[in-house]
Each structure stands twice: as structure tokens, then as C-alpha cells.
Amino acid sequence: MNRRIAALTIATVAILGLTGCSASSGVVDSPSPNASSSAPAEGQNGDQSVADACASAGAKVQEATKTLTDLDVSAAASDPEGTIAAFTQAADAIGAAAESVTNAEVRGAIGAVYEDFEAIRDLLSRMLLEGDASAIAGLPAAASEVQRSAAAVASLCGG
């Protein structure tokens, strides 16, 4: 039963998180006319505009969250390690997207999404790998935090 709850929770978290992240992707996939590259300029010392930073990180965040949409939720019970690995892969890719930009505001907002995905991964790990049913209690708040941080990125990036 706990694994069934975990599977439903994974699906819910993925949907909530992707709602916010997908909202930002519409804008970040359309870089400003002055953005010639998705990589931040090294010597700008944080002078990257919000629009350029959103464009640079947007595709990376969208690809990271796509990993979760491809996740077979029903496999959480039979392959808990694979489920945790998928969440880890998504979280790490979001963290890399945050680190790839020099704009402090965008870096911080995407960094918050990264931290929230890590928190969910940790709770799921406790549930699925350690059999800690008490971790279920933390999932609603963690899912809410993912939604909040993803909405903040969407708002910042014009989504």
C-alpha cells in the first residue's frame, strides 16, 4: 500500500512541478533578439539580463522535467532505485541549468526549484528505499514548494 501511495505521490509531484516549469518554458524558449548563444558570457560578472538567463536555462530545465514525464510511475514499486535515479537526474539537470547562468536573480530562482526537487527525491528515497512510511507526511508540503518555486521561475521569466 505504501508503494501505491508513493507512486501516486510521484505522479502528483511530477504534474505539479511540471505545471510551473512548463509555464516558464514558453518564454525561455524564445530568446531575446540579442541572445546569440545559449551559454552565458564568461566575462559578464552577472551582467546577463533576465531574458537571456531565462532563455539560456529554459531548455535545460524543460529537458530535465521531461525526464519526469517519461517516468513510469507504476514501476516505482518494482524499481525504486530507478525511480530515485530519475528524480536525481532531473534535480541535477535543474541544478546545472541554474549554475549555467550568471544572472543572480534567475540563478536563485532556478536554484530554488533544484532544492525543492532534491527535497522530494530525499523523501521518496526514504519511502521507497528505506521503507519509512512517515516520509509520506512531508510530500504535500514538498510538492507545494515545487509548485511555488516553479511558479516563481515562470513569473520571473515572463511565463
Image (cartoon, rainbow, N blue to C red):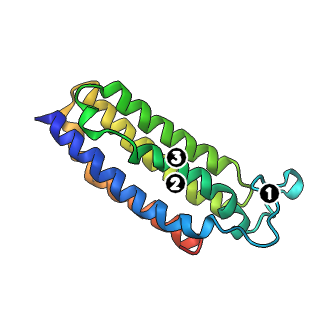
Q: Please, what is the three-letter code of the amino acid marked with disc 1?
A: Ser
Q: Please, what is the three-letter code of the amino acid marked with disc 3?
A: Ala
Q: Is residue 71 above or below residue 112?
A: above
Q: Residues within 10 Å of mark 1 (few under 14, many from 20)?
A: few
Q: How many marks?
A: 3
The residue identified by callout 3 is 64
Q: Position of residue 97 (x, y in %)?
A: 63, 49
Secondary-structure class at tag 3: helix
Of the numbered discs 2 and 3, the one sitting upstream in the chain is: 3
* x 42%, y 38%: residue: 87
Q: Position of residue 73 (x, y in %)?
A: 28, 40
The answer to whether residue 127 shows anywhere in this view is no
| Among the 4 quarters of the image, the one containing residue 104 | bottom right
Q: Are marks 2 and 1 in contact (CB under 8 Å)?
A: no
Q: Rounded to the nearest whole Å, what is the CA distance between mark 3 and mark 1?
A: 20 Å
* x 71%, y 54%: residue: 101
Farthest residue, direction right:
43
Of the numbered discs 3 and 1, the one sitting upstream in the chain is: 1
The residue identified by callout 2 is 112
The answer to whether residue 85 shows anywhere in this view is yes
Q: Position of residue 71 (x, y in %)?
A: 36, 40
